[in-house]
Image (cartoon, rainbow, N blue to C red):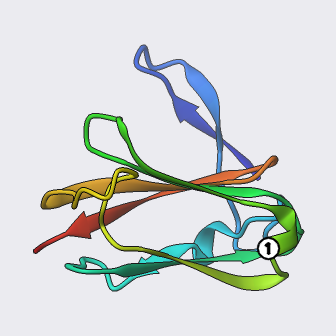
């Protein structure tokens, strides 16, 4: 579904809006993490209606990559998929309190949502 948005000059621009019925393999409405906020560990959950490779990335508020996991198509199933994040960066150092951006990405789509760490 396409909807019109406005750019910074007020000119109409197309904006992608994802519907609950995933047309791109990844369902925006059912991608989330729990608990949120978390202190020790969170589960990232997403639904797939196509089998494909998936990357799950966590970015800090400056846009720097904190954590990255690539999941091969052979490890993805139709329906619900889960991956855990312990709140540490790729070097194993615990991330500090704050808001982070979770990105779940396939070949056809990506979903970004906020994650909060409170220790």
User: Considering depth in this image, is 94 or 34 the residue closer to the camera?
Assistant: 94
User: Considering depth in this image, is 100 or 23 the residue closer to the camera?
Assistant: 100
The quarter of the picture where residue 65 lies is: top left
The quarter of the picture where residue 97 lies is: bottom left
Residue at left offset 40%, top offset 52%? 90
Work out which residue is located at the far front of the displayed protein and give it: 91
Residue 76 left/right relative to 92: right
The quarter of the picture where residue 35 lies is: bottom left
Where disc 1 sits, the SS reads helix
Q: Position of residue 30 (x, y in %)?
A: 60, 78
Residue 92 left/right relative to 14: left
User: Considering depth in this image, is 110 or 117 the residue closer to the camera?
Assistant: 117
Q: Position of residue 116 (x, y in %)?
A: 24, 67
Work out which residue is located at the far top of the displayed protein and give it: 9
Residue at left offset 48%, top offset 23%? 7
Mark 1 lies on residue: 75
Residue at left offset 45%, top offset 20%? 10
Residue 44 left/right relative to 52: left
Residue 75 left/right relative to 89: right
Residue at left offset 24%, top offset 77%? 37
- Answer above or below: position of 91 versus 97: above
- Answer above or below: position of 89 versus 42: above
Q: Residues within 10 Å of mark 1 (few under 14, many from 20)?
A: few
Q: Position of residue 3 (x, y in %)?
A: 67, 44
Q: Position of residue 74 (x, y in %)?
A: 87, 70
Circle count: 1
User: Considering depth in this image, is 45 or 2 the residue closer to the camera?
Assistant: 45
The C terminus appears in which quarter of the rendering? bottom left
């Amino acid at each position: 579904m396409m909807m019109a948005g406005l750019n910074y000059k007020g000119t109409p621009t197309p904006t992608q809006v994802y519907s609950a019925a995933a047309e791109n393999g990844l369902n925006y409405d059912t991608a989330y993490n729990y608990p949120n906020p978390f202190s020790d560990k969170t589960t990232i959950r997403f639904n797939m209606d196509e089998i494909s490779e998936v990357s799950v990335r966590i970015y800090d508020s400056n846009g720097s990559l904190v954590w990255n996991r690539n999941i091969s198509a052979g490890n993805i199933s139709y329906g619900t998929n889960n991956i855990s994040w312990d709140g540490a960066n790729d070097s194993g150092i615990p991330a500090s309190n704050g808001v982070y951006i979770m990105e779940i990405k396939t070949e056809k789509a990506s979903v970004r949502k906020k994650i909060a760490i409170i220790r």
